[in-house]
């Protein structure tokens, strides 16, 4: 065989499972930076809470729920996601939801979480802002004490609603600002550009909150630019479509902007057709600070380690690339530098100890 043919044949070979790489993923300390707590509502808990609260749901069994989790785009998913929230009514419900996620994260050697919540998805159903916040925060505090997982809490504005609504939500958060660390922007992206929320993000920054936004998941590269230039975000959530614009890629790489990529989410929402199309490896090659996250794991088929395993195998990531992704998760976090350095040292220990 000619050398060129041999190289081509090698490239065509499907990636092999790599046990040492898989073990590394399972052991590496990591931070999760893109997780919607409402998206961690597993069908079993959905049923238990529906029964506890006497809420009717349009499903007869857990299997039926899982069968309904077939989406052809973001909006398909969001319709079911908001419907699922209807079982969350009491502080204990939000506690149970968050605690269940933290136990899963702990099993995946997650040491730090920066989770999103969607207050408008609850207040518009008559659930008090404080009920939501108290339940989530109590679980996060227990997670810190009992599981050793530190946290930050990020309140998202639903971008299909108005900026006025977002301001009203920020007003509700004002008495609790020491308990909320940042704001984000999520929900239906196309048709709701970051520019729509420029004023409310400016106010959030004045209040000392961190800022991040979903951009470039389904929306064009211009939305990523707007998130940077108009919202002054510290992270881009997803960012896939930034790769269509080389000047934007250069800008993101130069500024060391963190991108919170969600491989299984991308697959299940048809942002990519195959997991091998995940932009994670390409982003690393371009010098972008990519991280791996689970987004809405109950709906997309896997928590953070499942996301790591899926891309590692499909893209045949090297162990060095996997370590880099774990490092990025801490250096892209809102943790103080001293804490980041401690986590990096722990990563080096695990990575070196093989
Ligand atoms: N809300 C929950 N998950 C989301 C996603 N992947 N994109 C936008 N909004 C969301
Ligand atoms: Zn998301």
Image (cartoon, rainbow, N blue to C red):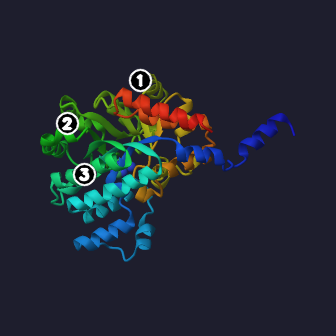
Q: Is residue 174 visible?
A: yes
Q: Is 110 located above or below residue 334 in the figure?
A: below
- Badge 1 crowding class, 10 Å Cα cut-off, few under 14, some 14 to 19, many 20 or more, is few
Which residue is identified by label 2?
Answer: 200
In terms of secondary structure, where does tag 3 sit? helix
- Residue sitting at 66 percent across and 50 percent down? 17
Which residue is identified by label 3?
Answer: 138
In terms of secondary structure, where does tag 1 sit? loop
Snapshot quadrant of residue 349: top right
Q: Is residue 207 left or right of residue 337?
A: left
Q: Is residue 325 left or right of residue 220?
A: right
Marks 3 and 1, the one that precedes in the sequence: 3
Task: Measure the alpha-carbon separation of dots 3 and 1.
Answer: 35 Å
- Residue sitting at 51 percent across and 37 percent down? 325
Marks 1 and 2, the one that precedes in the sequence: 2
- Most distant residue in the bottom direction: 60
Q: Where is residue 273 in the image (x, y as percent from the top left)?
A: 54, 51
Which residue is identified by label 1?
Answer: 255
- Residue sitting at 40 percent across and 31 percent down? 340
In terms of secondary structure, where does tag 2 sit? helix
- Front-lying residue, 132 or 238: 132
Task: Measure the alpha-carbon separation of dots 1 and 2.
Answer: 24 Å
Residue 94 is labelled as none
- Mark 3 or mark 2, whichever is nearer to me: 3
Kindly check if marks 1 and 2 are in contact, taking CB atoms under 8 A apart as contact: no
- Badge 2 crowding class, 10 Å Cα cut-off, few under 14, some 14 to 19, many 20 or more, is many
- Residue sitting at 53 percent across and 40 percent down? 279
């Amino acid at each position: 065989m000619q050398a060129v043919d041999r190289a081509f044949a090698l490239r065509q070979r499907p990636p092999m499972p790599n046990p040492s790489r898989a073990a590394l993923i399972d052991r590496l300390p990591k931070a999760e930076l893109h997780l919607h707590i409402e998206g961690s509502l597993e069908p079993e808990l959905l049923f238990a809470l529906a029964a506890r609260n006497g809420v009717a749901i349009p499903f007869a069994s857990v299997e039926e729920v899982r069968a309904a989790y077939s989406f052809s785009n973001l909006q398909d998913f969001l319709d079911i996601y908001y419907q699922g929230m209807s079982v969350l009514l009491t502080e204990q419900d939000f506690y149970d939801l968050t605690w269940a996620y933290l136990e899963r994260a702990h099993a995946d050697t997650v040491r730090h979480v920066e989770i999103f919540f969607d207050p408008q998805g609850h207040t518009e159903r008559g659930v008090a802002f404080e009920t939501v916040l108290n339940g989530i925060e109590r679980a996060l505090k227990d997670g810190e004490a009992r599981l050793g997982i530190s946290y930050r809490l990020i309140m998202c504005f639903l971008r299909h609603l108005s900026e006025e609504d977002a301001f009203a939500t920020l007003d509700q958060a004002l008495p609790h600002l020491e308990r909320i660390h940042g704001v984000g922007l999520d929900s239906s992206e196309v048709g709701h550009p970051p520019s729509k929320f420029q004023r409310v993000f400016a106010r959030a920054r004045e209040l000392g909150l961190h800022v991040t936004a979903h951009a470039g998941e389904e929306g064009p590269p211009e939305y990523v630019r707007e998130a940077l230039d108009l919202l002054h975000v510290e992270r881009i959530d997803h960012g896939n479509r930034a790769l269509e614009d080389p000047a934007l890629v250069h800008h993101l790489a130069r500024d060391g902007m963190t991108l919170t990529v969600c491989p299984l989410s991308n697959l299940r929402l048809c942002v990519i057709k195959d997991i091998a199309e995940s932009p994670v490896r390409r982003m690393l090659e371009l010098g972008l600070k990519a991280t791996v996250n689970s987004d809405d794991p109950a709906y997309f088929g896997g928590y953070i380690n499942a996301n790591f395993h899926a891309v590692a195998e499909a893209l045949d990531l090297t162990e060095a690339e996997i370590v880099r992704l774990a490092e990025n998760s801490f250096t892209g976090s809102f943790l103080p530098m001293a804490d980041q350095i401690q986590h990096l040292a722990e990563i080096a220990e695990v990575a070196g100890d093989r």
